[in-house]
Image: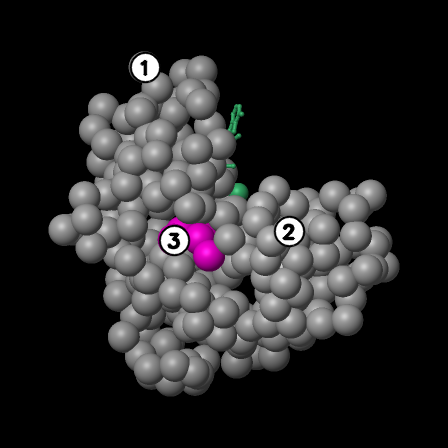
Amino acid sequence: MAADTRGLTAPADTGLTVRVRDLTRSFGERTVLDGVDLDIARGEFVALLGRSGSGKSTLLRALGELDPDVTGGGEIHVPRERAVVFQDSRLLPWTKVLDNVTLGLTGPGAARRGREALDEVGLAGREKAWPRELSGGEQQRVALARSLVREPALLLADEPFGALDALTRLRMHRLLQDLCARHRPAVLLVTHDVDEAILLADRVLVLDEGRIAVDIPIEQTRPRRHGDPAFLHHRERLLTALGVDTDRNQQEDTNR
Ligand code: ADP
Ligand code: MG
């Protein structure tokens, strides 16, 4: 039986934007999500780590209601106002940048709001460009503008910076932090990058064996620095949870 998630929001008095209980998803014999429980508070930024194939995208797709076959013995509450960003910007190639941002928006203010969103991501003046005329990083910024122009209560992002070079990724981290500080959506950011998770999130989760195996709040003030003892402590703990041998990594680092 498909879980009924249509238009349900978490009860207002809980302060939650997402509330999931006992979410299960199997492909044939293989159970990928095995009774996931997840709460995301209003405006909270949660990063989700996990090994490749651990079910991160499957979970994100379930929250985005992109997976009709997901089952939940319990509950899935997600807000109606959601936006999803993927690794690939998924812009329509035959539609100019501004129209990509405002696609589906109605009302007299749509173009103005689209222009403001482009301005916020640093792309003022590129409204009439075709997606192919933009770099990969710029295309992802258009994808962010397209999400935020709808003022979502929940932003779902599946490795949105995974295809970008390191320098562009750093700039995108800063941009995403600024946008989130301004718009305050709840965020679920799927990433395989432990540092990205600790830099950005209020809370970092690790998905393992179909469940949330680790759930750590990151309390350091922002901007966070890689060298801080608290940062290194979280990093080690998360790498261990991901099955990475941190002693060996440190050895390799010092040998470099
Ligand atoms: P992750 O995003 O953590 O790398 P995914 O959620 O994409 O992992 O996939 C988890 C597991 O589910 C993988 O083993 C993958 O092959 C399997 N899977 C995902 N989608 C499908 C599908 N539509 N059909 C069959 N297997 C799938
Ligand atoms: Mg994935």
The reply to whether the C-beta atoms of the residues labelled 3 and 2 are less than 8 Å apart is no
Disc marking residue 153? 3
Q: Which residue is mark 1?
A: 1
CA gap, disc 1 and disc 2: 35 Å
Mark 1 residue type: Met
Q: At numbered mark 3, what does the secondary structure look like: helix, strand or loop?
A: loop
Q: Say which quarter of the image contains residue 6.
A: top left
Percent of width and height locating residue 164 = 68, 62
In magenta stretch: residue 155: yes
Q: Residue furthest left?
A: 13
Marking on residue 102: 2
Q: Quadrant of residue 247?
A: bottom left
- Comes first in the chain, label 3 or label 1: 1
Q: Earlier in the sequence, mark 1 or mark 2?
A: 1
Q: In the rendered image, which quarter contains the C terminus?
A: bottom right
Whether 158 is among the magenta residues is no
Lower position in the chain sequence, tag 3 or tag 2: 2
Residue 233: percent from the left, percent from the top? 32, 74
Q: Which residues are magenta?
A: 151-156
Horizontal side of 7 relative to 217 (left or right) equals right
Q: Is residue 108 left or right of residue 229?
A: right
Coloring basis for residues: one colour
Q: Residue at x 77, y 71 (%)?
A: 125
Which residue appears at 20% of the width and 55% of the height? 15
- Provide residue 168's location: percent of width, then percent of height: 67, 71
Structural distance between the alpha carbons of marks 3 and 2: 18 Å
Above/below status of 162 relative to 251: above
The kind of residue on which mark 3 rests is Ala
Q: Quadrant of residue 71?
A: top left
Question: Is residue 8 shown to the viewer in this render?
Answer: yes
Distance between the alpha carbons at the discs numbered 3 and 1: 27 Å
